[in-house]
Amino acid sequence: MNKQSRLALDEWDYLSRHFGLCESDPTRSVYSVKALDLLDVEICSDYLDRLTVLLQSPSRMITASQFFKRYAALTAVPLLYAMTVYNKGLDLSAENCSLESSPGHSWLEYVSLADTDAVIPEASERHIWRNKVILALFAENIGKLIAVMSKVANIPKSILWENVAVRLFSLYEKRIGLTGEQQEQSRADFQYLVHQAPGALFGEKQNPLSRFYGKPTFSSASNMPMRVRKTCCFYYEVSSVEEYCSSCPKLNS
């Protein structure tokens, strides 16, 4: 049977400083938006319209893409880091997450959790526990929000899913690492997420990450091998210097 636990203080400190995941604090909730509320079409539309003005974005579609790059970094990245490195599962379902902002800071400064209890798996049941952690994050949060934003912003779901995938790949390949004697669990979790996890865990018919995973290659835009995106995230549309991402398919075509 899985055991209830909590993150240690140093673990919370790391997730907060590096990934922007925090415990809920009622005194800082003035600019808080519940992730669950964004699953409502009207609330989501209004949120994106206000963000479009703030980002000086040319359209709701481009705003949705920029939002999801940030949202994935604040939800998927710390949850998967805790799952793989700490072997602790946090609840990042939409019901448990709030988006936090404050004047003078990032338009989405961090994500807070109402319930911060963690679950530690029994060694023999880790695969079952891992499915539950992934399901809450994707099928019960990110996947639902992608479906709503795709509808209200008229943006292909593939763009939003690749925004998530890019951050997931970077987490495992660059921050956690996939090589070395201590990385067996990291390799196993990464392999499962990208190639083996069924679509149902993401709220999709098929695994939405697999198609974006390809071997890094050299291109005219970089002297280092990189994984060129299959979709464009439209970052150049909101960049003050009209800068393209280094992995942009338009830059590397």
Image (tube, rainbow, N blue to C red):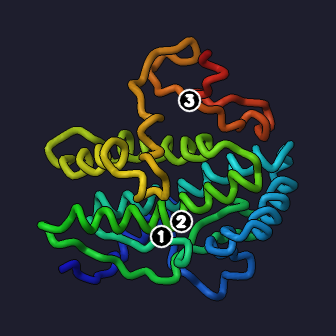
The residue identified by callout 1 is: 92
Q: Amino acid at mark 1?
A: Leu
Q: Marks 3 and 2: in contact by CB < 8 Å?
A: no
Q: Marks 1 and 2: in contact by CB < 8 Å?
A: yes
The residue identified by callout 3 is: 230
The residue identified by callout 2 is: 141
Q: Is residue 133 left or right of residue 67?
A: left
Examine the rendered structure and indicate whether residue 146 appears above or below residue 241: below
Q: Position of residue 186 (x, y in %)?
A: 26, 49
Q: Is residue 2 left or right of residue 165?
A: left
Give how far apart the Cα atoms at labels 2 and 1 are.
7 Å
Answer few, some or many: residues within 10 Å of disc 1's Cα (few below 14, many 20 plus, some between 14 and 19): many
Q: Position of residue 17 (x, y in %)?
A: 49, 63
Examine the rendered structure and indicate whether residue 196 appears above or below residue 128: above
Q: Amino acid at mark 2?
A: Asn
- Residue at the image position 44 percent from the left and 64 percent from the top: 15
